[in-house]
């Protein structure tokens, strides 16, 4: 346990440190087409759409500077998780794997959701494509589907299922063994996280409900992290190939990964919940003040 405590700072090392490790110790950058292709496409579409909108309406209109900054930060977080040597190390060290996934779910996903990038990306497409997609998005079946998957309860449950299901040892081992399953694992984490954060931070609805879902997610992900920390059994033996190289046993690597999920990653949910609670209370106070003012002017 002493070695585990000494290794905790490793869990907080940024991706740039892994990039240095990749240069010296054989953890390469990842240039697989299924990762770099979507990253480049989304960046190009977003940049083209923003430039078009700003040329027509003026800088900061249509897409605010803050939105553009959040998209850039979220995109860079995705690249740090999926392209830098952190990704290659994550296939051989469970703690790195956990850091990679938490970057996707609690850093990149909320930033991208808050940036609301879909409109800008549509403007990055040719006009005919933009009209066709706009018409499809306005159709009744799509609206019903979108309302269903972005309902706060549904999005929270879907995200929770993705997190717990991929930590079933058989599914986790399949993701390590098969590239297609590995891609599906990353995609399910990212997509469900985007739906989760969008439904709570961007969708119109009760902030009180959103706060409840954030704290519920913190509880169940914290529970999974705690189970990994205190387990005396190795859940994912195929993931422990590099543990000794980092001065850890395979079990200590698992415990450290659980600690990453339990403490630093889970802080994102209560922090967001407290921020929403503050906005909720401020809004209630403002509405009460406006009500008193309206009564006083009668």
Image (cartoon, rainbow, N blue to C red):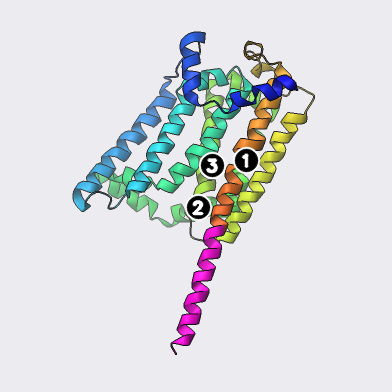
Residue 250, given in percent of the width and then of the height, sits at 70, 17
Labels 2, 1: front one: 1
Kind of element beneath mark 2: helix
In the image, which disc is placed on residue 193? 3
Placement of 37 over or under 270, stated as above or below: above
In the image, which disc is placed on residue 266? 1
Left or right, 275 with respect to 136, comes to right
Sequence-earlier tag: 2 or 1 = 2
Labels 2, 3: front one: 2
User: Which residue is at 52% across, 33% downward?
Assistant: 103
Q: Marks 1 and 3, how far apart in space?
A: 14 Å
* Pointer 1 local density, CA inside 10 Å: few below 14, some 14–19, many at least 20: many
Residue 134, given in percent of the width and then of the height, sits at 33, 51
In the image, which disc is placed on residue 175? none
**Quadrant housing residue 37:** top left
Residue 51 shows in the view: yes
- Per the rendered image, the range of residues in magenta is 278-298
Residue 81, given in percent of the width and then of the height, sits at 49, 28
Sequence-earlier tag: 2 or 3 = 3
Left or right, 203 with respect to 225, comes to left
Residue picked out by circle 2: 201
User: Which residue is at 23% across, 47% downward?
Assistant: 54
**Quadrant housing residue 189:** top right
* Pointer 2 local density, CA inside 10 Å: few below 14, some 14–19, many at least 20: some
User: Which residue is at 68% across, 40% downward?
Assistant: 222
């Amino acid at each position: 346990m002493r070695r585990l405590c000494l290794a905790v700072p490793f869990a907080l090392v940024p991706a740039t440190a892994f990039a240095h490790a990749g240069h010296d110790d054989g953890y390469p950058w990842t240039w697989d087409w299924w990762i770099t292709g979507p990253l480049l496409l989304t960046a190009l579409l977003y940049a083209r759409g923003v430039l078009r909108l700003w040329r027509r309406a003026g800088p900061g209109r249509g897409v605010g500077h803050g939105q553009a900054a959040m998209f850039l930060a979220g995109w860079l977080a995705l690249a740090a998780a999926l392209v830098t040597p952190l990704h290659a190390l994550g296939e051989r060290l469970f703690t790195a794997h956990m850091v990679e996934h938490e970057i996707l779910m609690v850093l990149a996903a909320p930033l991208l959701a808050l940036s609301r990038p879909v409109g800008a990306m549509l403007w990055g497409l040719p006009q005919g494509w933009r009209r066709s997609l706009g018409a499809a998005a306005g159709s009744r079946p799509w609206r019903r589907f979108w309302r269903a998957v972005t309902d706060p309860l549904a999005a929270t449950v879907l995200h929770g299922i993705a997190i717990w299901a991929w930590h079933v040892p058989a599914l986790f081992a399949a993701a390590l063994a098969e590239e297609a399953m590995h891609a599906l694992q990353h995609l399910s984490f990212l997509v469900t996280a985007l739906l989760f954060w969008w439904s709570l931070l961007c969708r119109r609805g009760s902030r009180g409900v959103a706060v409840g879902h954030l704290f519920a997610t913190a509880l169940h992900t914290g529970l999974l992290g705690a189970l990994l920390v205190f387990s005396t059994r190795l859940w994912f033996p195929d993931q422990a190939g590099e543990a000794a190289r980092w001065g850890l046993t395979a079990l200590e690597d698992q415990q450290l990964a659980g600690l990453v999920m339990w403490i630093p990653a889970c802080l994102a949910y209560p922090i967001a919940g407290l921020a929403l609670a503050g906005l909720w209370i401020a809004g209630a106070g403002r509405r009460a003040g406006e009500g008193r003012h309206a009564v006083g002017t009668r």
